[in-house]
Image (cartoon, grey):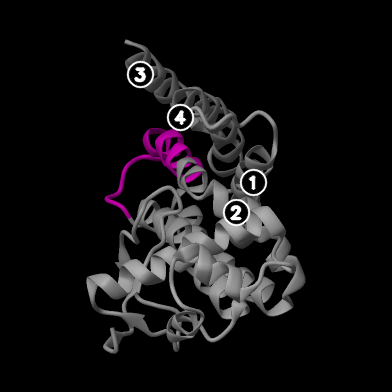
Amino acid sequence: MGQYSTETHYLCVECELPTQSITPAPGRLQPVTEQGRGTRAAIMHAALDQFAEHGYLDARVGSIAAAAGVAYGTFYKYFRSKRDLVRAILTDVYEDIMASRLALLNAEARPLAERAYPDILETLRSFYRHRTALRVLDVAVGAEPDLAAYIARLHEQTVEGCQVFVEGEAEPGSGFDPYLVSLTINAALEESARAWIRSGDLTGDPVRDDLRMREMARALTAMCVATIAPGVIAEALAVADSEEQAQAS
């Protein structure tokens, strides 16, 4: 358990153990053994439970360690403080969401009309996968300005990635600033996802919730395509309808 690497392992809050890996946030050290990764993930899951029950400000390191089934001192083998723990969870959650979005943007080129709906739907699903963490960590981000600034930097990376896509897809003579279009589209996607996650409309029933995400994806598709390339709105919505019919059959 004493060996560490700088590889980041995402925490999927609906799973038992971290899942994927990409380049880490600077300065973070991660356990390289299966046991170490399991212990780290257990602490992170226990923290989410404690934050949900007691709130970020009132949750204590001792309670988190006890809930994870580890000794108090073991906590500090993985995290310097409660703030460091929250930063680790936020990093895993947001890097997973942002990496998913950037992967879609950088995927093999397809016409905008073909990719808009499925890409937006996958983005909404990535937020849904992390719904528990996103709900309980809002208070932590509000209480820790440096965490909010860190998330803002992650968002900016995604906006810049989307800007390149917008520049390549915008209809000639549109007159829009690609950066502002990217900023608007990303804000609409994230705020729509987060507002729905906080609402009573989300039930936790995967089938029912996926249907609702599909409805949101269709509405967002119309809005986003109208901004970038209004001439292909009908085609983009036809793709959405076709996928819905295939899902229903």
Q: Are marks 1 and 2 in contact (CB under 8 Å)?
A: yes
- From the image, which quarter does the N terminus lie in? bottom left
Give me the residue at 41% from left, 61% from top: 11
Q: Which of marks 1 and 2 is in front?
A: 2
Please give the residue where the numbered disc 4 appears in the rendered image: 206
Circles 4, 2 touching at the beta carbon (< 8 Å) = no
Say whether marks 2 and 3 touch (CB < 8 Å). no
Secondary structure under tag 3 reads: helix
- Determine which residue is flagged by label 3: 247
Q: In this view, does 101 lie to the left or right of 106?
A: right
The residue beneath circle 1 is: 194
Spot occupied by residue 234 in the image (x, y as percentages of width and height): 50, 23
Label 2 packing within 10 angstroms: few (<14), some (14-19), many (20+):
many
Residue marked by disc 2: 134
Looking at the picture, does residue 80 appear above or below residue 109?
A: below
In terms of image quadrants, where is residue 59?
A: bottom right
Amino acid type indicated by mark 1: Arg
Q: Is residue 24 visible?
A: yes
Tell whether 35 sits left or right of 69. Answer: left
Camera sees residue 157: no
The first of marks 2 and 3 along the sequence is 2
